[in-house]
Amino acid sequence: KTKIQYLHLQPMRHAGIIPSIAFAPSLSTQTSHLSHKPLHLTALFNWKPKKAMDSALSASLTTKMADLDLTKIEKFAHQKGDALFGYIEQCQVEASSSDGTNPCFGNFLDAGTGSHSLRWIASIIHREHLLANTDHGESSAPRVSMKSFTAITADETMRRRVFEEAKELGVEDNHVIIGNWNEGVKVDEKGGIEFASDSDPDSSNKKALLEGQTFDTILADYLVGAIDGFSPYFQDQIFNRLTPHLAPGGRMYIIGLQPIPDSVVGDANIFCKITKIRDACILLAEHRCYREYPRDWIERHVKRAGMKVIETKTYPIRYDHQTMTRQINVGRSKLKLFPSKGMAKEMGKVLDDLEKESLEVCKRQPDGRITLGFDYVIVAERPK
């Protein structure tokens, strides 16, 4: 692996380059953890001037950064390194320029974290270092920052994976929480969300996730599509659930996938077939499929939650043979959980045929890729 070498430490002008959320409202310092040991005289004789201590700290941080392998996040140093997150950064820059502040995401909540969003967050925390050690000129990503971040996942396996990657990326001093957005809340008579009390007979006696905490920015990265796997039928309430955690004037960035149609005319239909067979495999393994929602559905529910849609942008999706094979392999990974070996064997043949057909389709395309559907980014804001 190649490592980025840092020759000097950039001035810490932005709070966002501090990889810590020690000052997040959810983390309190317990006095029982403080040391009450007497001060030894040797500590007085080992005293160093502040300038010398700052130099030692700077050297220590420089050494730590030099030891990190940041190749996984290098692409975010370029404006076009990631189209969707690049657009989010540009929106934040434009919002900051309108009120004369430095582009900063503030206290940041990743409402449904994963490896990709974590890597982007790490690139924000290490942005000064990435820009100092790459040469993209005018195509460089903007200097954006964040004060703190909290990441949520409903899956323990994902939490462990994200935490391990956070350590690799040097952002382990953060808040990675396992929890479910439907815990500790109930739907009121008007269809809104309210926090359940311990005395409520319908309450599960679980405290609501992040109750009482607010954030300047919330990211919902394919969150709505994933809800069906963890909290079925809660999709229509998720924005009502998240809005109380967004500070007045704060922004929510929602990334989603326009649902793949059942069928289309032409070569792109191969991917429609793949998604249907993949989902059939998931169901036969007695697992739940993700369920994506269209852009206009998301916009309607964002408005119902009391937020304003600022703008929306779509990105057509290009699929090559490797991308389609990954989806086929999702189906293959479920075969061992099928009700019978015979059924698994026959479905395996279907998946093999789909892989061959997808290769033939891609070979017919000028650039080896088909175009089908789109991703979208919706920028929403809570009124001040």
Image (cartoon, rainbow, N blue to C red):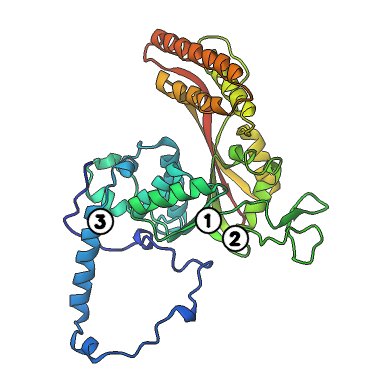
Quarter of the image with the C terminus in it: bottom right
Write down the residue under mark 1: 177
Up-down: is 252 above or below 82?
Answer: below
| Occupied quadrant, residue 101 | bottom left
Depth check: 101 or 135 in front? 135
Write down the residue under mark 3: 65
| Occupied quadrant, residue 343 | top right
Q: Secondary structure at mark 2?
A: loop
Depth check: 140 or 266 in front? 266
Write down the residue under mark 2: 210
Amino acid carrying mark 1 in the image: Ile
Q: CA distance from mark 3 to mark 2?
A: 31 Å
Q: Residue at x 57, y 18 (%)?
A: 272
The reply to whether the C-beta atoms of the residues labelled 2 and 1 are less than 8 Å apart is yes
Q: Secondary structure at mark 1?
A: strand
What x and y, as percent, mark residue 249?
57, 57
